[in-house]
Image: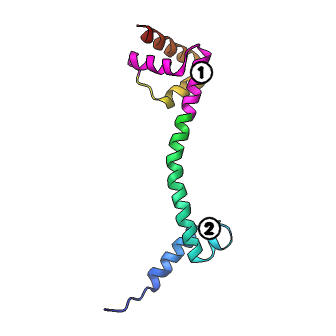
Amino acid sequence: MPRVRRGPKRAANRKRVLKQTEGFFLTKSKLHRSAQESLEKALKYAYVGRKLKKRDFRSLWITRIGAACRNHDISYSKFMGGLKAAGVDLNRKMLSEIAIADDAAFADLVATAKNAASA
């Protein structure tokens, strides 16, 4: 089996890892092995964080919509059920933006939901 000379490839890999770990604490940004371990852990946390971010934002939107619904004397679940029955196809992100920015438009949506829920 031929001998493998890893000079440039190995150096490039180490350089890439150390570049990615700039700003990490102490040896985690200086020594290749600890930098590699901390980078793997950081990338794992980043992956999980991207999933949690979606969950957190959906929860925030629901909280905002629920607060606006309480101001208009309707529960969140009845509001969402009424919108679904009325065929209004707005996602929670847009509903929360409407609830924050345009109270009159949200009041119209609440009226639509109440009419659809009662019918």
The verdict on residue 75 being magenta is yes
Nearer to us of marks 2 and 1 is: 1
Q: Where does the C terminus fall, quadrant-wise?
A: top left
Considering only vertical position in the picture, is 6 above or below 95? below
- Mark 1: give few (<14), some (14-19) or many (20+) Cα within 10 Å: many
In the image: residue 67, left or right of residue 92: right
Residue at 50% x, 11% y: name it: 111
Color theme of the render: rainbow
Q: Give the residue at the far right of this rendering.
A: 26
Q: Main secondary structure of the magenta part?
A: helix
Q: Which mark is residue 108?
A: none
Q: Residue at x 48, y 77 (%)?
A: 12
Q: Which residue was labeled with disc 1?
A: 68
- How far from the left and from the top, in percent, is residue 23? 65, 65
Q: Residues within 10 Å of mark 2 (few under 14, many from 20)?
A: few
Between the C-alphas of marks 2 and 1, the distance is 45 Å
Q: Which mark is residue 22?
A: 2
SS at mark 1 in the image: helix
Q: Position of residue 32 (x, y in %)?
A: 57, 76
Identify the magenta region. 60-88
Which residue: 52% across, 77% down? 14
Q: What's the amino acid at mark 2?
A: Glu
Q: Quadrant of residue 1?
A: bottom left
| Image: 79 above or below 4 | above
**Which label's residue is closer to the chain start, 2 or 1?**
2
Q: Tell me, yes or no, whether the highlighted magenta stretch contains residue 111.
A: no
Tell me the amino acid under the disc marked 1: Ala
Cβ–Cβ under 8 Å for marks 2 and 1: no
Measuring 37% from the left and 92% from the top, which residue is drawn there?
Answer: 3
How many numbered discs sit on the rendered protein?
2
Q: Residue furthest left?
A: 1
> Circle 2 sits in a helix, a strand or a loop, which is it?
loop
